[in-house]
């Protein structure tokens, strides 16, 4: 349970951790000595020892010292907790940034994450108290003492599994009714759905369903808890038998000091609980240990893409040449559904490429592979001759305008820079060219940016990205899906106008009327590249692209102002 946490504490805060451990061990050692002395005093009292008062006085320092040691240990543990948080919070955030979809930061900020050090030390202290009690029992009979300790451990192991299951169920993380309850609660309390709830009278319906599903969840937990006493009884039978054997054997021994034996064993027996299940605290300490294990597991990232999982390739050549993008024999699936099947394509420096296809064709997945958010099942992905995961923010050279771009609650400059120190040398000219320098005049603290303003900020974030030594790649991942064709053309043209001539560009879209003048169009269909070429070449081919274009051309009313992406060819 604490095999990961304690080494992590030792690594991150050696002095405080060492003192905490030393105080805890000393306290438990004094506890053992105290129990043995009390046993000795009880035996002498039964014999009518006249010097008994001296023996009693001798244990006073232990009676005072043990609480003081525990208090000092608690103080150090809380200091250690603060020191660990200084490492844990940034590490969890870093993990989430490297693993999109992870919620490790949220876990680190939860009660378990905040109090995890105390939980781990509580478990450790209870285990040590259990060991002290076991030593006391073994001092009277070693084999039977170990038998009692083993029975406590067995009982605790069985009940701990039940406790963990119940904890998960009551949290609503395992059963379907609990998941529905969570959804209904979020829907009822989120301002996002307030209009629909009010207009359609959905609130009462969801409230009723919330009550029903919550009751189902509680009924399941109640039914399970009613079976607990049977499980607990079965788990306790070995312990009860071991205790009877232990007491029976020792009490019938002819040469035993009954007063000393009973006093020692009676004092020690409650501490045996530390060898068994510690209930929900044990579960929470285990969760914290898993959290520490996750943030601690940071394997070294080799610079060679061919050495990384999912980057094996059938090609013997391991260099990517001068291409900005080189995807070789890439295979990727979501479960049993293939998304990309042995995909091969390259993007050259300065080339403007559009990747098109119907919804679900794998366009956005391809981009996630390219920027390192996903890893291929097989094949190789090269970005400027390197694996995308080996690139750092300082030499990445990739600007992205996503479909659901960020809308951070920052001032204009911060919303563009996002904390980056090194930006494009022409940063000011880019911002002025996009008209963003006037945003401050049009907006006060109570006014929100319009959709168009947010879009310009997203474009600016990509365009001010500092070029890498190899150049720069700009990616537009369907950022104009909510716009009409005219506005979409204007957006793409704006990016082209303000980009460097040497920038490579990848446009991801399922709408074809705005990308007719790019250098190359790649068509994804059935997890593969079905066609590629210029717009005119694909129209002359009369294949899938030509069919999609004809359908869209007939469906949309477009501006005829001659605005196209990519400029003249």
Image (tube, rainbow, N blue to C red):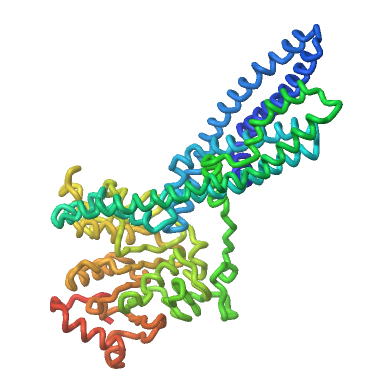
Q: Residue 567, image x and y in percent?
A: 26, 76
- Examine the rendered structure and indicate whether residue 157 appears above or below residue 501: above
| Residue 394 in view | no
Name the residue nearer the viewer: 448 or 458: 448
Quick one: which residue is furthest to the bottom in this view?
Answer: 541
Q: Residue at x 32, y 68 (%)?
A: 476
182 horizontally vs 54: left or right: left
Quick one: which residue is furthest to the right in this view?
Answer: 255
Q: Residue 168, image x and y in percent?
A: 46, 50
195 horizontally vs 458: left or right: left
| Residue 505 in view | yes
Q: Residue 32, image x and y in percent?
A: 72, 27
Q: Residue at x 25, y 76 (%)?
A: 511
Name the residue nearer the viewer: 169 or 386: 169
Q: Residue 319, image x and y in percent?
A: 55, 75
Q: Residue at x 35, y 71 (%)?
A: 505
Name the residue nearer the viewer: 373 or 172: 172
């Amino acid at each position: 349970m604490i095999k990961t946490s304690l080494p992590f504490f030792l690594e991150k805060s050696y002095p405080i951790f060492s003192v905490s451990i030393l105080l805890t061990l000393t306290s438990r050692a004094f506890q053992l000595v105290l129990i043995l002395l009390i046993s000795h005093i009880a035996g002498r009292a039964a014999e009518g020892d006249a010097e008994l008062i001296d023996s009693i006085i001798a244990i006073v320092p232990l009676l005072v010292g043990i609480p003081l040691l525990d208090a000092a240990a608690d103080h150090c543990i809380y200091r250690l907790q603060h020191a660990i948080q200084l490492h844990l919070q940034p590490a969890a955030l870093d993990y989430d940034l490297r693993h999109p979809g992870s919620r490790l930061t949220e876990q680190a900020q939860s009660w378990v994450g905040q109090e995890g050090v105390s939980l781990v030390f509580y478990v450790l202290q209870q285990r040590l108290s259990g060991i002290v009690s076991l030593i006391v029992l073994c001092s009277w009979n070693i084999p039977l003492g170990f038998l009692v300790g083993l029975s406590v451990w067995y009982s605790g192991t069985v009940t701990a599994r039940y406790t963990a299951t119940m904890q998960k169920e009551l949290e609503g993380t395992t059963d379907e009714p609990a998941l529905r309850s969570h959804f209904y609660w979020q829907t009822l309390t989120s301002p996002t759905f307030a209009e629909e709830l009010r207009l359609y009278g959905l609130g009462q319906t969801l409230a009723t369903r919330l009550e029903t599903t919550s009751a189902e969840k509680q009924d399941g937990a109640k039914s399970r808890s009613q079976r607990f006493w049977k499980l607990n009884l079965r788990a306790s039978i070995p312990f009860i038998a071991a205790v009877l054997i232990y007491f029976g054997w020792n009490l019938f021994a002819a040469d035993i000091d009954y007063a000393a034996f009973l006093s020692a064993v009676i004092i020690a027996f409650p501490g045996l609980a530390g060898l068994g299940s510690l209930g929900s605290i044990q579960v929470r300490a285990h969760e914290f240990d898993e959290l520490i294990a996750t943030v601690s597991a940071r394997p070294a990232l080799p610079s060679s893409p061919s050495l990384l999982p999912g980057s094996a390739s059938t090609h013997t050549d391991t260099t990517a040449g001068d291409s900005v993008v080189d995807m070789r024999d890439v295979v990727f699936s979501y479960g049993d559904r293939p998304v990309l099947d042995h995909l091969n394509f390259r993007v050259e420096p300065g080339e403007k490429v559009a990747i098109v296809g119907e919804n679900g064709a794998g366009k956005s997945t391809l981009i996630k592979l390219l920027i390192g958010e996903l890893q291929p099942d097989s094949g190789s992905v090269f970005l400027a001759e390197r694996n995308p995961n080996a690139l750092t923010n300082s030499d990445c050279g990739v600007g992205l305008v996503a479909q659901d771009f960020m809308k951070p609650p920052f001032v204009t400059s911060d919303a563009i820079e996002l904390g980056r120190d090194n930006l494009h040398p022409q940063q000011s000219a880019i911002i002025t060219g996009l008209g963003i320098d006037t945003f401050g005049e049009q907006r006060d603290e109570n006014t929100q940016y319009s959709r168009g303003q947010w879009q310009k900020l997203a474009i600016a974030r990509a365009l001010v990205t500092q070029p890498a030594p190899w150049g720069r790649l700009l990616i537009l991942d369907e950022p104009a899906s909510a716009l009409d064709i005219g506005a979409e053309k204007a957006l793409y043209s704006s990016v082209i106008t303000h980009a460097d001539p040497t920038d490579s560009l990848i446009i991801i879209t399922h709408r074809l009327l705005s990308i007719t003048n790019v250098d190359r169009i790649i068509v994804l269909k059935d997890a593969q590249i079905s066609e590629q070429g210029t717009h005119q070449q694909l129209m002359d081919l009369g294949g899938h692209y030509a069919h999609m274009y004809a359908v869209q051309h007939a469906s949309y009313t477009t501006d005829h102002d001659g605005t196209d992406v990519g400029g003249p060819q």
